[in-house]
Image (spheres, grey):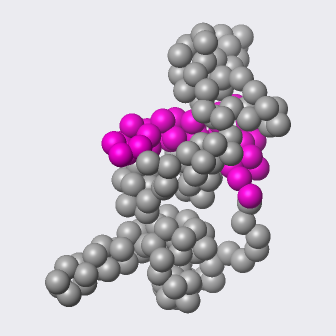
Amino acid sequence: MSALLALDELENSRVAHELIRLRLRVPIVHYLTSIHPKPLRMRWRQVHGESPHNGKLPDSVRPFITNPMMLAKLSSFVALYNRLDEGNSRSVTAAMLLSAWEVHGRVGSAGLDINAAWYAIRDVRSRIVGWERCARCQAMYIYEPNVSHARSCPFCRLALAKARC
């Protein structure tokens, strides 16, 4: 049985390493993997050649929603994560986050911060922000009435802006 635990710990360490390589903040990696922050900070220094970021983490995904394009990227990531997570539990796991990130990268959506992606999933699943279906295009998107860019469907907004050009 101890060999099985060792394999679980090894996989957890591998996932933590990948998340650090992708620049997921150390407190979030700690939360997802339960690995103590000290070895995670040491790993960050080994991988990136610098100390990990200090400072307060955002409370939610809201500060990351800076324009309709970012909302569309975050919404598409959450939709993909939800599709891949067959258990559809409310919790976010490190392995699922990494899997969704890899698939999302293959479909060509660059310019998304993994920290923003984690907050988006967490906030949608815990209902900190809404997860709405657009009445016009039927796409699901993050809805937040207190953020101007998140009051309507980003996909329809982007399509309308492109049609105007």
Q: Position of residue 35 (x, y in %)?
A: 47, 81
Does the magenta-highlighted stretch encompass residue 68? yes
Instruction: For the N terminus, give its image quadrant.
Output: bottom left
Q: Quadrant of residue 104?
A: top left
Q: Residue at x 72, y 77 (%)?
A: 54
Q: Main secondary structure of the magenta part?
A: helix
Q: Position of residue 96 (x, y in %)?
A: 39, 55
Q: Compare residues 142 and 71 and report the one nearer the observer.
A: 142
Instruction: For the C terminus, give its image quadrant.
Output: top right
Left or right: residue 158 versus residue 149 is left
Q: Quadrant of residue 16?
A: bottom left
Q: Compare residues 67 and 59 and report the one nearer the observer.
A: 59
Does the magenta-highlighted stretch encompass residue 84? yes
Q: Residue at x 68, y 75 (%)?
A: 53
Asked whether residue 105 appears in the rendered view, the answer is no
Q: Residue at x 48, y 36 (%)?
A: 79
Q: Residue at x 60, y 48 (%)?
A: 126
Q: Position of residue 116 (x, y in %)?
A: 62, 52
**Image: magenta residue range:** 59-88
Left or right: residue 36 versus residue 5 is right
| Number of numbered discs visible in the structure rendering | 0
Q: Position of residue 5 (x, y in %)?
A: 25, 81
Asked whether residue 99 appears in the rendered view, the answer is yes
Vertical side of 68 occupied by 100: above or below: below
Q: Compare residues 8 and 67 and report the one nearer the observer.
A: 8
Vertical side of 47 occupied by 72: above or below: above
